[in-house]
Image (cartoon, rainbow, N blue to C red):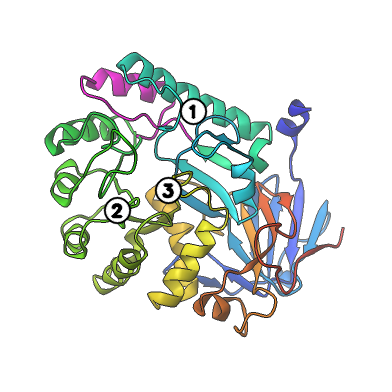
C-alpha cells in the first residue's frame, strides 16, 4: 500500500477559473492569471486559460472563482515521530493542520520526545533518525502528505565542529531552538551557529522567557550575539521580551523575525507594524510553535494571517506572503511560491459563509478565518472541503 503511494504521480493537472491567485511573493502578491497547469507535481504554466496548453489533462479542477494560494508553511513546529504528539497525547495533528491549509512544517526541535537524549551521541542520532523518519512518513502519505522537515537537534555543551559536519553529511539541515538545551550563553551559541552555517545547517534561537522546564530566558543581548538565522518566536513562546527589546532585535539584526500563534498577540501585532515601518517586511515569517502547552492549533496559521491583516492593518495579500513566499526564501525551500518550476502545493480558499467581507481578502481584513475548499500537495489533492475551517462560500470541483 505504501509503495503505491510512493510511486503516485499527479500527471497533468489543469486548475482553471481561479478568481484570485496569490503568488506568495510580497513584492507582487496578486498574479494576473486564472489558470495553472501542473505536470507530475510541478507547475509548468501560469496565465490565462486561452494561453495555456490544457489538452490531455488527467485531472481538471474548476475553482469556480475561488482563490488559489501557495500551501501555507508553518515555520515553527515541535514534532516527535509519526502523526502523534506526546505533548498533548494527540493523534493526527499534522493531518488536521493540513485541513487548515498547511502543506509544509519546519521543526524547531523534537524536544517533546519522552526521554530525549542529551548526550552528544544521542543528540546526533535523534536528529538523523527524525530526519529520515519524517522523510519516509511523507513518502508513505502519512500525515496527509504534509512535508515535515524534521531532524533539528537541540544543541548541548561539548559539541564540536565535527559533530555539525557529521550531521550535515547525514542530511541534517536544521538546528532546534538554541536555548532549549544546555547552550544558553551568547558567545557559546555564536560559535556553534557559525559551525552550523559553515556546514549548511540553518539555525533558530529561542526568544523570550522559558517555555518548558529546562529552557531559560533568552534576551535580546543573547539573540544578537548568537546571530542565528531565525529569531524564533520573536513575540515569545509564550512569554515575550519587552516591546523595547523586540524593537532592538528588529533594528539591530538582519535575521528573520518569526511571529508565532503561541506567543504574545500584542507583540505580534507591534512587531509586524515595526517591520513595515523599517521597510523590511521580507523578514517576517509565521509559525505556530505547536504542539505546546496550549495544544495544537490546526487553524493557527490562518488565525495568524487574520490577526495581522485585521489588527496590524497590513494588506491581507501581503500577510499571506509572510506565511508562504517569505518562509520559502528564508528557509531555502522550493515550495511556497506560485512560479513555474516550483512544486504544486496549493490551498484553495474562499471567504467563510456569511462573513461580513465582500470577498476573501476583505473577510480576512475584517479578522475572519477563510474557508478551505481543497488542499493539494505535489499536484495531488489531499483533502476537499476542510473539516476544520468554517465552510467556504464556494469550493472547487472536479471537472474530470
Rendered position, 287 above or below 81: below
In this rendering, the count of numbered labels is 3
- At mark 2, the secondary structure is loop
- Give the crowd class for mark 3: few <14, some 14-19, many >=20 residues within 10 Å: many
Which span of residues is magenta-colored? 150-175
Q: CA distance from mark 3 to mark 2?
A: 12 Å
Which secondary structure dominates the residues rendered in magenta?
Answer: loop
Nearer to us of marks 3 and 2 is 2
Q: Please tell me which residue is depicted at 52% across the width and 33% down the height of the picture.
A: 86
Residue matched to label 3: 289
Measuring from the top left, give residue 400's x and y in whole percent: 87, 58
- Give the crowd class for mark 2: few <14, some 14-19, many >=20 residues within 10 Å: some
Nearer to us of marks 2 and 1 is 2
Q: Nearer the viewer, residue 87 or 4?
A: 87
- For marks 2 and 1 on the same chain, the one whose residue lies earlier in the sequence: 1
- For marks 3 and 2 on the same chain, the one whose residue lies earlier in the sequence: 2
> Would you say residue 57 is visible in this rendering?
no
Residue matched to label 1: 131
Amino acid at each position: 500500500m505504501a509503495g503505491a503511494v510512493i510511486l503516485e504521480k499527479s500527471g497533468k493537472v489543469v486548475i482553471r477559473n481561479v478568481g484570485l491567485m496569490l503568488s506568495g511573493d510580497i513584492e507582487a502578491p496578486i498574479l494576473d492569471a486564472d489558470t495553472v497547469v501542473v505536470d507530475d507535481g510541478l507547475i509548468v504554466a501560469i496565465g490565462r486559460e486561452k494561453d495555456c496548453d490544457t489538452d490531455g489533462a488527467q485531472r481538471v479542477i474548476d475553482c469556480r472563482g475561488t482563490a488559489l494560494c501557495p500551501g501555507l508553511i508553518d515555520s515553527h513546529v515541535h514534532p516527535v515521530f509519526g502523526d502523534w504528539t506526546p505533548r498533548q497525547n494527540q493523534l493526527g495533528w499534522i493531518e488536521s493542520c493540513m485541513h487548515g491549509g498547511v502543506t509544509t512544517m519546519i521543526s524547531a526541535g523534537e524536544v517533546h520526545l519522552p526521554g530525549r537524549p542529551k548526550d552528544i551521541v544521542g543528540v546526533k542520532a535523534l536528529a538523523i533518525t527524525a530526519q529520515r523518519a519524517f522523510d519516509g512518513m511523507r513518502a508513505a502519505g502519512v500525515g496527509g502528505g504534509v512535508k515535515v522537515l524534521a531532524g533539528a537537534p537541540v544543541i548541548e555543551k561539548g559539541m564540536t565542529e565535527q559533530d555539525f559536519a557529521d550531521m550535515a553529511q547525514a542530511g541534517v539541515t536544521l538546528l532546534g531552538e538554541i536555548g532549549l538545551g544546555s547552550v544558553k550563553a551568547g558567545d557559546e551559541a555564536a560559535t556553534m551557529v557559525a559551525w552550523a552555517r559553515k556546514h549548511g545547517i540553518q539555525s533558530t534561537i529561542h526568544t523570550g522567557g522559558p517555555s518548558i522546564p529546562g529552557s531559560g530566558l533568552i534576551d535580546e543581548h543573547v539573540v544578537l550575539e548568537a546571530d542565528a538565522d531565525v529569531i524564533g518566536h520573536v513575540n515569545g513562546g509564550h512569554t515575550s521580551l519587552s516591546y523595547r527589546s523586540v524593537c532592538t532585535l528588529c533594528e539591530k539584526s538582519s535575521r528573520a523575525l518569526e511571529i508565532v500563534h503561541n506567543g504574545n498577540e500584542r507583540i505580534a501585532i507591534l512587531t509586524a507594524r515595526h517591520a513595515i515601518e523599517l521597510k523590511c517586511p521580507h523578514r517576517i515569517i509565521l509559525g505556530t510553535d505547536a504542539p505546546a502547552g496550549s495544544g495544537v492549533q490546526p487553524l493557527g496559521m490562518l488565525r495568524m494571517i487574520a490577526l495581522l491583516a485585521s489588527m496590524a492593518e497590513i494588506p491581507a495579500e501581503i500577510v499571506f506572503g509572510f506565511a508562504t513566499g517569505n518562509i520559502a526564501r528564508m528557509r531555502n525551500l522550493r515550495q511556497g511560491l506560485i512560479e513555474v518550476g516550483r512544486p504544486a502545493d496549493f490551498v484553495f480558499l474562499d471567504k467563510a459563509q456569511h462573513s461580513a467581507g465582500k470577498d476573501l481578502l476583505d473577510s480576512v481584513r475584517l479578522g475572519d478565518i477563510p474557508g478551505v475548499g481543497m488542499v493539494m500537495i505535489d499536484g495531488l489533492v489531499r483533502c476537499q472541503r476542510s473539516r476544520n475551517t468554517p465552510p467556504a462560500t464556494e469550493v472547487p470541483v472536479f471537472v474530470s
